[in-house]
Amino acid sequence: ISKKLIADGAKVIMTDKDESRLGEAASELKPFGAVKLDTTSEDSVKLAKQKIKRLSPRIDVLVNNAGVAHHSESFELTKAELTVGINYYGTKRVTKALYPLLSDHGRIVNVCSYLGRLAEVSEPLQKRFSDPNATEESIDNLVEEFLTGVKEGDYKERGFNDSMYSMYGLSKLALIAWTKVLAREAMADPRKILVTGCCPGWCRTDLSNHTGRRSAETGAKVVVWLAAEVDYDPTMSGKLYRDNQEFDWQTGNLLSTGEVYSTPTGTN
């Protein structure tokens, strides 16, 4: 993502919790700035915000791409907490910190997932996640219900999926739900900030242990498109995109063609 944006002339501030890897990437890509940031740490996020603000008092685009996946048929509370802690709570923590720095008609792009589709949970849970009047608190409550279910061993009875991708999928389902809540609030902001979500696909990155079917370059295309290429369009607020086309939250299929994104080994 950073590589493409930088090549296109954007001033990019890269972040990573691993300072060594961040330094290596910065040496290669020559971004406008590189700042250590651990999304799970309030102190780290606050310090990163200060450094980012010194580099650029205003930012035009925030791309939330930090994520982790545990693919296991056995659910462990520590893994579940880590997954939602990074993919959901971490994304919220960073967004809230940097939101005041966003410019007029700024953009927030949340990297979500096809596995965050509503069909992955029971109908009662689907209604709660997709409630047009949902709030951040109501989404938080659903996430905590999942964690309680994992702790007590009854997550399936509570309506959550028991597939090997469920921890990751639930974290992305919650992220999509919150993306839609945030989109409503951000568009009501005088700055008219555009919030969207996207699915890059199952890519050959660290997240997939480099087993994905897509290259990182292919997966980055939809993120870059939403961040910098597509014209600002308020009607895109809160919508989800894959391959530069809107996809359905219920099924994960493309709305324009109905194309099913099948995945024998998983998907992002």
Image (cartoon, helix red, strand yellow):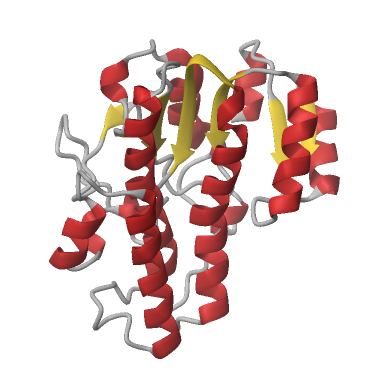
Q: Nearer the viewer, residue 191 or 26?
A: 191
Q: How many marks?
A: 0
Classify residue 140 by image quadrant: bottom left
Q: Which residue appears at 22% of the width and 45% of the height?
A: 133
Q: Nearer the viewer, residue 244 or 124?
A: 124
Q: Quadrant of the N terminus?
A: top right
Question: Does residue 104 show up?
Answer: yes
Does 191 sit above or below residue 88?
Answer: above
Q: Which residue appears at 45% of the width and 85% of the height?
A: 151
Does 219 sit above or below residue 213?
Answer: above
Classify residue 246 by image quadrant: top left
Question: Does residue 165 show up?
Answer: no
Q: Position of residue 144 (x, y in %)?
A: 41, 70
Does 43 sit above or below residue 241?
Answer: below
Q: Position of residue 261 (x, y in %)?
A: 27, 47
Q: Position of residue 235 (x, y in %)?
A: 26, 20
Give the side of residue 142 with respect to residue 256, left or right. Answer: right
Give the side of residue 78 with respect to residue 237, left or right. Answer: right
Give the side of residue 86 with respect to residue 181, left or right. Answer: right
Q: Position of residue 74 (x, y in %)?
A: 45, 83
Q: Which residue appears at 74% of the width and 25% of the height?
A: 53
